[in-house]
Amino acid sequence: MMAVSAAISEQAASLGVSILIGGALFLLYDIFRIFRRVVPHGNFWIGVEDFFYWLCCTAVVFVMLYRENDGMVRGFSIGGIMIGMLLYYFLLSRFVIRINVMVFGTVFGLLGKIFGTILLPFRKHGKKIIYFFRKRLKKVCRAVKIGLCKL
């Protein structure tokens, strides 16, 4: 059998690591996608999340390139990351998101009902208290406006 040189075996190991990192990076993005579906929020916060995701990706890819290729950017490393992302996306992503959204949605829905039931009396009395203070505050604001107009 033919012996494989050490350089080629190191590059093959580096390709395997980059494929695994690509899948892990897409799994991290799926975690953000699950969070966005379970807890809806606005475009500003989505942008902030994406910014931190890309910061994390940059750090992970930099460390991988530094350790595996002595800091050299090689095409097979970038290609391996892309292959890992594509493999994860087509093989696992749909199922991971669907199952986790269902599980977390159910858990958060149950917690919301439990806490909603517990906090219902406080909300009813809280509305009365807020109405009372709002009414008093309006009177104070009118008095201040009248006082300012007389100056």
Image (tube, rainbow, N blue to C red):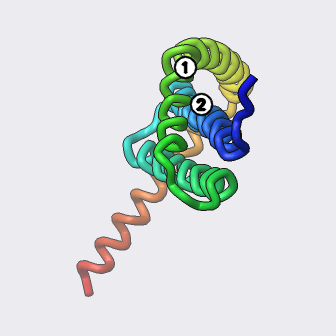
Instruction: Establish if 2 lies above or below 134.
Output: above
Give the residue drawn at x 65%, y 40%. 8
Q: List x then y, in percent, for residue 97.
A: 56, 19
* Observer able to see residue 27: yes
Give the residue drawn at x 37%, y 42%. 43
* Observer able to see residue 21: no
From the image, tell me which residue sits under label 2: 23
Q: Is residue 144 left or right of residue 129?
A: left
Q: Secondary structure at mark 2?
A: helix
**In the rendered image, which quarter is residue 104 located in?**
top right
Q: List x then y, in percent, for residue 114.
A: 72, 20
Give the residue drawn at x 67%, y 51%. 68
Position of the C terminus, as image quadrant, is bottom left
Task: State the count of labels.
Answer: 2
**In the rendered image, which quarter is residue 138 located in?**
bottom left
Q: Is residue 57 left or right of residue 5?
A: left
Q: Nearer the viewer, residue 87 or 47?
A: 87
From the image, tell me which residue sits under label 1: 93
Q: List x then y, in percent, for residue 73.
A: 51, 55
Amino acid at dot 2: Gly
